[in-house]
Amino acid sequence: MKYLDEYRDHRIARALAAKIVQSTTRPWVLMEICGGQTHTIMRYGIDALLPRVIELVHGPGCPVCVTPLETVDKAIALALQPDVILVSYGDMLRVPGSRSDLFRAKAQGADVRIAYSPIEAVKIARSNPDRKIVFLAIGFETTAPANAMAAWQARYQGLTNFSMLVSHVLVPPAIRALMVSQSNRVQGFIAPGHVCTVMGCKEYEDLVRDFHVPIVVGGFEPVDILEAVLMLVRQLEARQLGAEVKLENQYVRSVSYQGNLPAKELIAEVFQIADQKWRGIGSIPRSGLRLREEFAAFDADRIFDLGEITVEEPAECISAEVLQGLKKPPDCPAFGIRCTPENPMGAPMVSAEGACAAYYHYRRHTAAS
Ligand code: SF4
């Protein structure tokens, strides 16, 4: 297949669904990691095409959803400082912190600006030498090269008024944390294709070996998801007969084994691996990135004295269980009643990639529908 239409062709999708039915002999719980994949599943009703015994659960792959409340609160506190311009990707502005969000801070007079690329924040810093520019640098491995380039460019250009509030997360340690959890139900993973476009498939091999769990790197169109599900089901059924599971790459049109080597080198030059708190999940060892010592002059956490911020999630929000595949959004008593995209209680309802927003948007008001 060459064209996007073909990856949305209902005849190809139905043929794959029929193969999945033929291949399935028992229940399997599969997790798609990425919020973009969750939205495709909801939008095209892919779960409804599958045998009822195959359950798709939704993983922690929405960057906005897993950004800690503390980071949102820090961004708001920085934005409210009179000499600061806070620059952020647009979908972070409505994410609720513990008491407010960046939109409300903007309404109170804070200078909050939306950027489509971190390099825009570098340009804002160059044009406003008398202001302090802070870029809210969040995301998975996908956004890490551009964020690394922003810090690299700021140093190259000798900027002294640019910094980044970094909250970067990494997918493989999150899968490891899910697999070692006592409550884990997931038997196979669809790994996120865009992350692997940067990092390659290679780093998922250890997970397959350590946990005997099949992983298929998948794309984002309906045919991609169905083909990835078929590959997982065939592996899981074969495992019952004694076969070894393996890492497979469904998204071959974008993902290579090694990934994008120049991008990986840039990430490694600017960032180092660190423990990271994930909203709703808690701290996961070596699951994040922070700026290296050589880039400390661009680290907002070190430049600004924000003190230690600790906050509690709203008690009613079950996003932690949703992000770990233990519950579905409609299992939450607040879903669609007290929590809506207009009035979100938790990040999975705010973000365009959040599982709660996907269920709400596509009118899935029951977990089984
Ligand atoms: S519906 Fe709202 S309150 Fe419930 S888990 Fe999702 S974000 Fe949290």
Image (tube, rainbow, N blue to C red):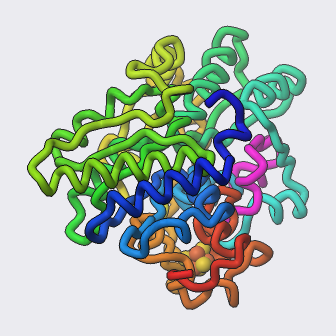
Q: In this view, does 238 lie to the left or right of 314?
A: left
Regarding residue 98, the answer to whether it shows in the image is no
Instruction: Name the residue nearer the viewer: 33 or 319.
Output: 33
Q: Is residue 244 above or below residue 60?
A: above
* Quadrant of the rendering where the C terminus is positioned: bottom right
User: Which residue, as the protein is rendered here, is positioned at the far top?
Assistant: 156
The quadrant the N terminus occupies is top right
**Direction from residue 360 to residue 26 in the image, left or right:** left
Q: Is residue 77 above or below residue 161?
A: below
From the viewer's perspective, is 201 left or right of 102? Answer: left
Query: Residue sitting at 84 percent across and 28 percent down?
Result: 124
Q: Tell which residue pokes out farthest to the left in this image.
A: 242
The picture places residue 94, in percent across and down from the top left corner, at: 75, 62
Q: Does the magenta stretch include residue 342?
A: no
Give the image location of residue 192, x and y in percent: 49, 42
Foreground residue, 61 or 84?
A: 61
Tally of numbered tags: 0
Q: Is residue 55 above or below residue 264?
A: below
Q: Which of 203 and 90 is in front in this view?
A: 203
Give how far across and how far down residue 5 sits, in percent: 73, 40
Task: Report the image quarter containing ligand 1.
Answer: bottom right
Q: Going 33% across and 54% down the picture, which residue do you hit?
A: 233
Magenta region includes residue 90: yes
Q: Residue at x 53, y 21 (%)?
A: 295
* Vertical position of residue 197 compared to residue 110: above or below: above
Using the rendered view, name the quadrant where residue 341 is placed: bottom right
Residue at screen point 56% across, 83% down: 330
Residue 317 is at least partly visible in this image: yes
Residue 288 lies, in percent from the top left, at: 42, 41
Q: Give the range drawn in magenta.
A: 77-97
